[in-house]
Image: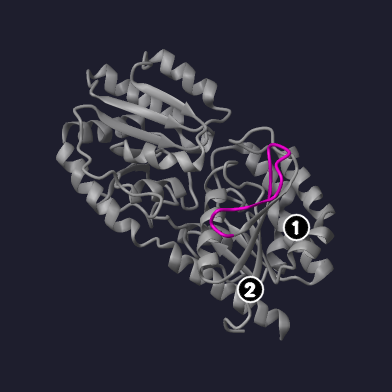
């Protein structure tokens, strides 16, 4: 197909900033860099208000169906169902207004349902980006997700079977996808980071009090309880020259607050709540070390953002970090749920600020491997190939 015709792509994601986490962030920045490659991009998403469609400053159009959201920080099953039925209900109007050549669905469910419907009814090809918890078998320590995947397996399989391509954002997630559907050729295209937005603070120097940062939803997968307990261990050991900023919200907030009270950590921990994407860079720039004690990840965008901001990473040794974190190079691993090991790593960096500086330089260097320019180009290749296949 070449680049003679400007491809018109419709991205579909029930979450888009300021709603949601890494999946929405991926959609936003991929759209930005595809526009730079000459692609016409529209985004279909939900909203928490009666907000109208608008022209995004980065050159693409955002269309809303809704209001379908009650909170910016999370999505519940009824909201997912409403997004499926509402987007499909308006699909004919959406097709008439946007005229997409191809649809790019972020998350198998609910977004893939819209792609599947448009493929069957309008013969518009689509690709599916699998990003983590939407993959059957992805274990985040929440039994409700296992039940959800069991009930929705037939729909997920149909979405994947009709996709021109299925894309995983890491090698470990590809392996998880292959367990669910071994006969598909799963592509790997990683998440990226926009270094025009996320970069270190010039002339930054470490203070006596080391500043740790956690950015994520407060849900079981992300391990906020492990992190708060580790801070309690530090305090018990008499190590008090540290602080922790928690950015995010979710249904484990009461648990976090109870643990802060239990360990008497109020003066050490600052919970900032849900922060818009545009305000995030300053939190990274004013931190020294990033911590993410997850049970499992696809490829966490927040870790890439932290790296591009020059922060070392402390993470649990679980799937999803293997392409981001090199042990003792740009960060440190600890065994999942081992709060004592996490506390030891935090203490080590508190007592050895020169080590933070060394790990920081390597994080910044490694972040250059996750260029959105290359990632957008890889996706454009898939769009072109999909359209060639659909027209042959």
Q: Position of residue 2 (x, y in %)?
A: 58, 84
Classify residue 150 as left or right of residue 177.
right
Examine the structure image and report whether residue 50 is included in the region drawn in magenta: yes
Q: Mark 2 falls on what kind of element?
A: loop
Q: Position of residue 254 (x, y in %)?
A: 54, 20
Circles 2 and 1 in contact, beta carbons < 8 Å: no
Identify the residue at image location x=54%, y=43%.
21
Examine the structure image and report whether residue 175 is included in the region drawn in magenta: no
Q: Mark 1 falls on what kind of element?
A: helix
Q: Position of residue 166 (x, y in %)?
A: 61, 66
Please determine whether, in this image, residue 257 is positioned above or below residue 107: above
Q: Label 2, on which residue? A: 7
Give the foreground label among 2 and 1.
Answer: 2
Quick one: quadrant of the C terminus? bottom right
Quick one: quadrant of the N terminus? bottom right
Q: How many marks?
A: 2
Q: Which residues are magenta?
A: 45-59
Whichever of callouts 2 and 1 sits on the residue coming sooner in the sequence is 2
Label 2: how many residues lie within 10 Å, few (<14), some (14-19) or many (20+)? many
Q: Label 1, on which residue? A: 114
Identify the residue at image location x=25%, y=45%.
202
Q: Position of residue 33 (x, y in %)?
A: 50, 63
Q: Main secondary structure of the magenta part?
A: loop
């Amino acid at each position: 197909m070449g680049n003679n015709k400007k491809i018109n792509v419709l991205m579909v994601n029930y979450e888009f900033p300021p709603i949601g986490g890494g999946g929405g962030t991926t959609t936003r920045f991929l759209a930005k860099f595809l526009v730079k490659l000459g692609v016409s991009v529209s985004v279909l998403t939900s909203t928490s208000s009666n907000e109208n469609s608008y022209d995004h400053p980065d050159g693409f159009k955002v269309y809303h169906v809704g209001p379908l959201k009650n909170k910016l920080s999370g999505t519940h099953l009824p909201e997912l169902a409403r997004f499926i039925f509402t987007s499909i209900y308006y699909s004919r109007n959406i097709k008439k207004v946007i005229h997409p050549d191809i649809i790019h669905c972020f998350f198998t469910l609910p977004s893939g349902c819209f792609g599947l419907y448009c493929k069957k009814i309008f013969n518009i090809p689509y690709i599916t980006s699998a990003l983590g918890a939407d993959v059957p078998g992805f274990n985040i320590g929440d039994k409700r997700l296992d039940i959800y995947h069991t009930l929705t397996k037939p729909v997920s399989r149909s979405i994947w079977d009709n996709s021109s391509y299925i894309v995983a954002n890491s090698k470990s997630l590809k392996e998880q996808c292959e367990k669910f559907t071994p006969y598909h050729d799963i592509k790997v295209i990683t998440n990226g980071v926009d270094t025009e937005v996320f970069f270190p603070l010039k002339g930054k120097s470490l203070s006596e009090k080391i500043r740790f940062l956690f950015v994520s939803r407060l849900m079981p997968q992300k391990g906020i309880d492990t992190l708060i307990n580790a801070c309690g261990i530090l305090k018990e050991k008499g190590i008090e020259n540290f602080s922790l900023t928690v950015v995010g919200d979710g249904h484990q907030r009461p648990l976090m607050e109870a643990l802060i009270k239990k360990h008497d950590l109020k003066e050490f921990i600052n919970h900032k709540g849900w922060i818009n994407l545009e305000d995030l860079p300053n939190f990274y720039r004013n931190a020294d070390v990033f911590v993410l004690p997850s049970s499992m990840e696809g490829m966490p965008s927040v870790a890439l953002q932290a790296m591009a901001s020059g922060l070392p990473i402390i993470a649990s040794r679980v799937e999803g970090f293997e392409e981001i974190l090199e042990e003792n190079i740009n960060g440190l691993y600890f065994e999942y749920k081992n709060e004592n090991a996490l506390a030891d790593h935090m203490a080590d960096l508190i007592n050895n600020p020169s080590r933070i500086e060394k790990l920081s330089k390597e994080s910044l260097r490694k972040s250059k491997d996750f260029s959105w320019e290359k990632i957008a180009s890889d996706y454009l290749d898939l769009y072109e190939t999909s359209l060639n296949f659909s027209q042959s």
